[in-house]
Amino acid sequence: MSKFITACINQPNNSDTQSGNLGGETTELMDFKPLRFIFLTQYYPPEPGAASLRLEAMAQELTRRGHSVSVVTALPHHLGTGAKRQPWMVREKIRGIEVVRMWIWRISPERRFWWRLLNYFSFVVTSFWGLRQFSPPDYLLVESPPLFLGITGRLYSKLYHVPYILSISDLWPESAVALGLVKNPWLIRLTKGLELSLYRHAHYVSTVTEGIRRAVMDTHTIEPSRVLFFPNGVNLDQFPALPAKASLRHKFGGAQAKIFLYPGTLGYAQGLDVIIDAAIRLRKEPDIVFVLVGEGPVKQHLLQRVQTEGLTNVFFEELQPVEKMPEYFAISRAVVVPLRKHPLFHGARPSKVFPAWSAKVPIIYVGEGEMAELVRKSEGGMVVPPEDGETLAQAVMHLAHMEEGLWKQMGQRGWQFVHDHYTWQHIADEWLKGIQPRPGL
């Protein structure tokens, strides 16, 4: 056990982080006229998820600097079909941003991939009508995935002579192939061709991780100077450290329980079986429980495993609004963030890490690559190998019984790291430095 602790507890890292620093306050104003943007995305608040939060933060930061942002998105659909009939179009304002929501074919999260294609392509069609509700902007920003939305963006760009920025939060079809969701060789070739074509015709490509950035540049379809970086970050005011609610703790074992939280999509990429594997090994530890908050295609599988094993130390909670998540962080000993073992995920940066650190909660990152290095650099958590339930169980035991002062220091270091490097304000500043004014502006 001592060797494990020595290997996993992050040692101080004094390497210089000033180059590419993403922290601090806004230090300079735009030196050209304000720009007009339209964001085209299938997901925007109140939809949950990393892309939704990041795009809202980007819109708010651009607006705060005097630019104009409008959004074309889908009607809320994350949790499936619902009971009410959908309207064709809804127009609203969210925190000062004008948003047009268009009809989409809603499906439940458990539906097979081919049903999800219907979901994607329905919005590919209706979103074009949404774009026509606004006068042509200086830039159209298109969020992928779904990659197919790039078809709408490319068509609009060509017809209205508007340059588009392709914002990539996940490599597609590479990730779908890696997860075994897409196996048809014809579909793989078709989507790969679409991907490269969208890169080639984009005015800029914006990426959320360095790994995705390198992968885009390796295609040699776009100049490196036109590949931008807008990583996941956090609004520290949105995820404060709160006192724990006794009523919420009571749902998951009471005041003595050490709660290890997973918040977010219960999906294929996360490899959430590792949490069940750890829970099996810790079933005789009465004070340790796991709480999974969210929905997704593997939820039924996980529930079945818990039932089959007769586990009483794993709880499932339905998806919660973003504003409720600080209450769940407040009762947590750590947030567990797993990803499956695959080279594709070496460049991943799961967004749930940053809100947890904002709330001063340590991380157990079950994975490799870019995010593992950030956790080590921050000293705000522990890193264990992917898909390794035994090592995760050891990490959970270590954090559960860590001396209280040391545990608080770990959470404080995570908070300091995002404060210094990953606030939305400075991320937006760095991103805007790469956007050049169009002729005449």
Image (spheres, rainbow, N blue to C red):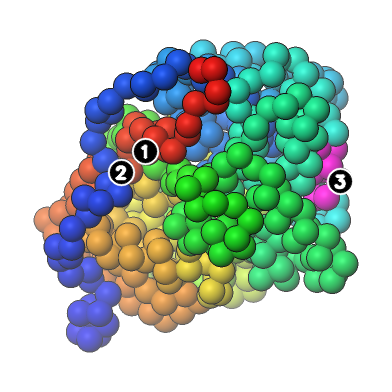
At 71% from the left and 54% from the top, the residue drawn is: 195
At 23% from the left and 71% from the top, the residue drawn is: 9
Q: Nearer the viewer, residue 421 or 271?
A: 421
Judge from the rendering whether residue 198 lies leftward or rightward of residue 367; answer left or right.
right
**Which amino acid, mark 3?**
Leu
The reply to whether callout 1 and callout 2 are in contact (CB within 8 Å) is yes
**CA–CA distance in space, label 1 to label 2:** 7 Å
Q: Nearer the viewer, mark 3 or mark 2?
A: 2
Residue 118: which disc?
Answer: 3
**CA–CA distance in space, label 3 to label 1:** 37 Å
| Label 2 secondary element | loop
Which segment is the magenta one? 116-124
In the rendered structure, which disc, 3 or 1, sits on the residue that comes first in sequence? 3
Is residue 354 visible from the viewing direction of this image?
yes
Asked whether 199 falls inside the magenta stretch, the response is: no
Picture quadrant of residue 257:
bottom left
Judge from the rendering whether residue 313 lies leftward or rightward of residue 180; answer left or right.
left
Asked whether 117 falls inside the magenta stretch, the response is: yes
The reply to whether callout 3 and callout 2 are in contact (CB within 8 Å) is no
Location of residue 118 in the rendering, given as x and y in whole percent from the top left corner: 86, 46
Q: Nearer the viewer, residue 343 or 164?
A: 164
**Could you classify mark 1 by the number of other residues whose Cα lies within 10 Å: few (under 14), some (14-19), or many (20 or more)?**
some
The reply to whether callout 3 and callout 1 are in contact (CB within 8 Å) is no
Whether residue 185 is situated above or below residue 217 in the rendered picture: below
Q: Nearer the viewer, residue 285 or 28?
A: 28
| Label 1 secondary element | helix
Residue 430: which disc?
Answer: 1
Q: Main secondary structure of the magenta part?
A: helix
Q: State the residue position of label 2.
A: 22
